Image (cartoon, rainbow, N blue to C red):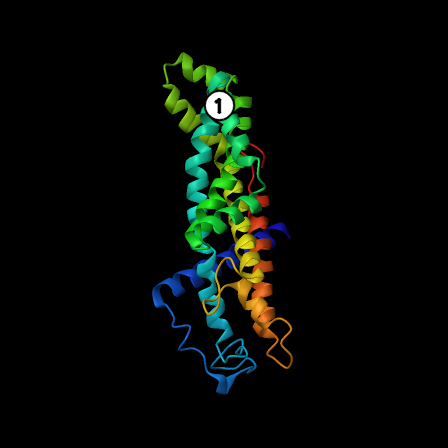
Amino acid sequence: MKRLVLGLSLLFLALVGVAWCTSMVVGSDVVADVDPSRANLGPGPDAWLGTDHLGRDVAWRLVTGSEAFVGPGLVAAGVALCLGLPGGALAGYLGGVTAGVVRYLHAIIGALPRFVLVLLACTIYGSEPMVLAIAAGVAFAPGLGQAVETRIAALRSREFVLATRAHGVSALRTLAWHLLWVNCRTLVARQVLYLLSFVLVLETTLSYIGGFGIEEPQPSWGNMLAFEFGVTDGNPWAWLAPAAAIWLTVAATLSVASSLEEPGRG
């Protein structure tokens, strides 16, 4: 059963990736798509999920809406890795003053809840996707760094690390290969997946609330849901589809993250 769930999760995430690539390559004119003459149509050959109350193709807006979180999620992951990974690795391996300084920096950033930090950044610098991405990456960096520091600190006195030193292996190679790659890659991958699901939930929440994130007429799964939810006599797929897409993407991401096994444990 676990294999089936994992396979379905990977397949769904692959479809999200294909949707994002398709939207980036093809592009869309969100204004030209408005056609009141075909408002609230049900699913059909010309519109697989029907249309919203402005006559826009729900399925294509769902595809285009993937741009709102996939790209920013990847940028956020890059920022979190660049900020959290080196500091956490050095703190765990060296300890002492280095660990104290890194922990202090992490404590400063982590003093604000992640959502509040991102919201504050969007308030000051605007709600552009890249602002959200960078802020989310900065907000997630302390957690990633602390997880890596804890893992490496627990391993730095193990026999295999002492053996690398005895054989003249450089500290950089020991840290980069034997500790980070061999023993922390699964941990880091899991943290990155958590970050991607965080960015999705964050972006869709801000877009749903309005005033932040992606706003109409540009599509986001969050503003699609807000735009259509509660519309009387509308096409129910216009809000059911983005709601299901949000739920399934988060569930699939967390499913893949939970399936990652540590070295030597399976």
- Quadrant hosting residue 206: bottom right
Q: Quadrant of the C terminus?
A: top right
What residue lies at 58% left-to-right and 72% top-to-bottom? 228
- When the figure is inspected, residue 108 is found, relative to residue 196, above or below; the finding is above
Q: Residue at x 47, y 50 (%)?
A: 132
Q: Give percent across and percent down for residue 83.
A: 43, 35
> In this orientation, does residue 38 appear?
yes
Q: Nearer the viewer, residue 113 or 156?
A: 113
x then y, percent, for residue 31 = 41, 75
For the view shown, which residue lies furthest in the left direction?
Answer: 25
Q: Residue 128, located in which quarter of the rendered image?
A: bottom left
Farthest-out residue, top:
166
Q: Nearer the viewer, residue 80 or 128?
A: 128
Q: Amino acid at mark 1?
A: Val
Q: In the image shown, does 159 or 113 lie closer to the viewer?
A: 113
Which residue is denoted by mark 1 in the rendering?
A: 101
Residue 169 drawn at (x, y percent) = 37, 18
Circle 1 — which element?
Answer: helix
Query: 10 Å neighbourhood of mark 1: few (<14), some, or many (≥20)?
Result: some
Q: x and y percent of residue 100 in the render? A: 51, 21
Q: Residue furthest bottom?
A: 37
Q: For the image shown, how many numbered marks are present on the structure?
A: 1
| Residue ID at (55%, 30%) | 107
Q: Determine whether 179 is above or below 251 in the image.
A: above
**Is residue 181 visible from the viewing direction of this image?**
no
